[in-house]
Amino acid sequence: MQKLTYRHAHGPADIAHWDTQQLRDEFLIEPVFTPGDINITYSFHDRMLVAGVTPTTEALEVVLDKDLGTDFFLQERELGVINIGGPGSIDIDGRVEKMATQDGFYISRGTRHVTYSSDDPSNPAKFYLASAPAHTEYPTTRISIDDIKPLEMGDGMSLNERKIYQYVHPNVCQSAQLQMGLTKLAPGSAWNTMPAHTHARRMEVYLYFDVPEDARVFHLMGEPEATKHLAVGNEQAVISPSWSIHSGVGTSNYTFIWSMCGENKAYTDMDIVQPNEIL
Ligand SMILES: O=C[C@H](O)[C@@H](O)CC(=O)C(=O)O
Ligand SMILES: [Zn+2]
């Protein structure tokens, strides 16, 4: 079964008086992964679409046409995929490739059929998808975590030692507007994206995972001078509008996938917000 949910775009004035539940209803995405199913979220922030595909006994395919006003899902879109579950495989218009944990793919606009399978239904693959509108085609590219040289960021004394693996990034493959990667916090570190930042030129979606069952990540959002938080559990995602900071602190270390789209592909095009500027 495939479920499609739309999320409207909101401005900073909208959230000023929202209670916890309304904030969660509009910005938190959960569940992302349902065994045997596909959960799709279409955000009107830059039209980013994210999905969790969890095949068990049968292969699964995202099928979208009328919802996008096109004949098929990737007619006018590009796609990034990272598997965060058990081993599986992907079939991209007949090209079949194994997808070990944290293997990824950039998939070209114009691709007709992408199907996802798990090797073992009791330890399913969990394919996380991020897709943005694309004005042209770029080659489908396999992206293995072992081939990425991570950026080493932060330090243990500031509780933010982490490695940033850039998957869909100009160093690795071309894309029209999508950027995607994975950030792993070291044991003993808890803060991501600290100092925090905004980037008015693009939006972002976070998928938090490898969060222990009882742990929570307090995802910070809002304009720097008016922040709120979302308490996020394992394998839950958050929509981050371009006007919002996105940073978070966990009760343990964790990993997350970030996907971005918008005006440019300059990863460093961010406006840093120092801790003492946050209210
Ligand atoms: O715009 C960049 C994205 O927010 C993330 O790549 C930042 C991040 O993973 C981190 O600093 O921990
Ligand atoms: Zn960011």
Image (tube, rainbow, N blue to C red):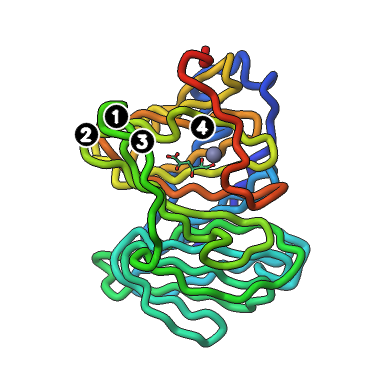
**Image coords of residue 277 (percent x, y):** 53, 15
Mark 4, other Cα within 10 Å: few <14 / some 14–19 / many ≥20? many
**Image coords of residue 148 (percent x, y):** 40, 62
Disc 2 beta carbon < 8 A from ligand 1?
Answer: no
Mark-to-mark CA distance, 4 and 1: 17 Å
Residue 14, located in which quarter of the rendered image? top right
Q: Looking at the picture, which amino acid does disc 1 mark?
A: Leu
**Image coords of residue 215 (percent x, y):** 26, 33
**What kind of element bears circle 1?**
loop
Give the residue displayed 48% in from the left and 13% down from the top: 276
**What kind of element bears circle 4?**
loop
Is residue 183 rendered to the left or right of residue 189? right
Disc 3 beta carbon < 8 A from ligand 1?
Answer: yes
Is residue 217 rendered to the left or right of residue 28? left
| Label 2 or label 1, whichever comes before in sequence order | 1
Mark 3, other Cα within 10 Å: few <14 / some 14–19 / many ≥20? many
Pointer 2 with pointer 1, Cβ within 8 A: yes
| Label 3 or label 2, whichever comes before in sequence order | 3
| Label 3 or label 1, whichever comes before in sequence order | 3
| Label 4 or label 2, whichever comes before in sequence order | 2
For disc 1, the marked residue is 159
Give the residue displayed 56% in from the left and 83% down from the top: 93
| Label 3 or label 4, whichever comes before in sequence order | 3
Q: Nearer the viewer, mark 3 or mark 4?
A: 3
Residue 67, located in which quarter of the rendered image? bottom right
Disc 4 beta carbon < 8 A from ligand 2?
Answer: yes
Q: Looking at the picture, which amino acid does disc 3 mark?
A: Gly
Residue 107, located in which quarter of the rendered image? bottom right
**Image coords of residue 120 (percent x, y):** 26, 72
